[in-house]
Image (spheres, rainbow, N blue to C red):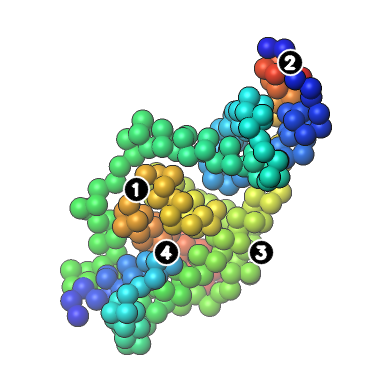
Amino acid sequence: MKADITVTDNNNPHNWLNDHGDYLYRYAMSRLHDEELASDLLQETLLAGWKGHAGFSGSSSVRTWLVGIMKHKIIDHIRKEIRERNLVESVESDPTSAYFDADGSWHEAPQAWHENPEALCASGQFHTVLDRCIEKLPEKQQLVFRMRDVSGEESEAVCNTCDISATHLHVLLHRARMALRYCLQHHWFNQEEKS
Amino acid sequence: MKHACQEVSRLASDSLDRPLSLLEKLRFHIHLSVCGNCRNYTENMHLIHKATEMMQQTNYGHIRLSREQQQRLHDILHRETGV
Ligand SMILES: [Zn+2]
């Protein structure tokens, strides 16, 4: 394909890559957690941008415009993933029941942690443990947890991306947070007390 | 209140994503005032919530495309767009 339009600084895809490539790559990585996939989606985004840049009005910045394209690529990818891998979670059988006795009281009492988020974040080891705990979550819980709690997206956006109801999102997040808290209790906080 | 802690743990999570109804709020706070376990649970969950949010910035803040990835993308762009 030959470029039959004038290439300027603003519509040169190589400039997009140089100026916004890292940002877009980070954006995809924080949501998908997969280097190869993030790089592929960046490629698709830049090429889609090239094909459609005539439609770029210039009313927003180039970066905002490219992020908008990438957002759609990510949504498409996630929906396809959910569909093809049949990522469903039963609403009927509630895995959080395992944390409670038959009368609905805690099977194992949650402990007070006496920690602050800044100190936790300063610890590289904590990151590793947290990452491992997140990776142990069932796939669909992991997906919504990463979008909502790790990337900080609005609930509505997560529901829209995954094509699920708000109630279903709340169920999945509740399960994820419950399992994560338990995992951290056992793999981080209990270990700390011993050492 | 039957199954109190189990239900309250759900409210604790939901409160991060939606406004609780007046009745739910009342139930939640009355229960927390008498249940140390659920107070700990709620505090732990808030701590994790804040820590994951902060982690996002420190963890992903330094991520960059590698030289090889950049070169590969430049090559593909050149091939596909002719620019
Ligand atoms: Zn309780």
- The span from disc 2 to disc 4 (Cα, nearest Å) is 49 Å
Question: Which residue is label 2 attached to?
Answer: A4
Asked whether mark 4 lies closer than 8 Å to ligand 1, one says: no
Question: Which residue is label 3 attached to?
Answer: A122
Q: Are marks 1 and 3 in contact (CB under 8 Å)?
A: no
Residue type at tag 4: Asp
Q: Do the residues labelled 3 and 4 touch (CB within 8 Å)?
A: no
Q: How crowded is mark 1: few (under 14 residues within 10 Å), some or many (20 or more)?
A: few
Left or right: residue B5 compared with residue B19: left
Which residue is found at the position 72% from the left and 12% from the top? A2
Q: Which of marks 1 and 3 is in front?
A: 1
Residues at discs 1 and 3 both on one chain? yes
Secondary structure found at label 4: loop
- The span from disc 1 to disc 2 (Cα, nearest Å) is 43 Å
Which residue is found at the position 21% from the left and 53% from the top? A93
Quarter of the image that includes the N terminus of chain A: top right
- The span from disc 1 to disc 4 (Cα, nearest Å) is 15 Å
Q: Residue A164 carries which label?
A: 1
Q: Which of marks 3 and 4 is in front?
A: 4
Vertically, is B34 above or below A109? below
| Residue B18, x across and y down, in percent | 40, 66
Q: Residues within 10 Å of mark 4 (few under 14, many from 20)?
A: some
Question: Which residue is label 4 attached to?
Answer: B17
Q: Nearer the viewer, mark 1 or mark 2?
A: 2
Q: How crowded is mark 2: few (under 14 residues within 10 Å), some or many (20 or more)?
A: few
Residue type at tag 1: Ile
Secondary structure found at label 3: helix
In terms of sequence position, does the residue under pointer 2 or pointer 3 come before the other?
A: 2
Q: Residues within 10 Å of mark 3 (few under 14, many from 20)?
A: some
Vertically, is B72 above or below B10? above
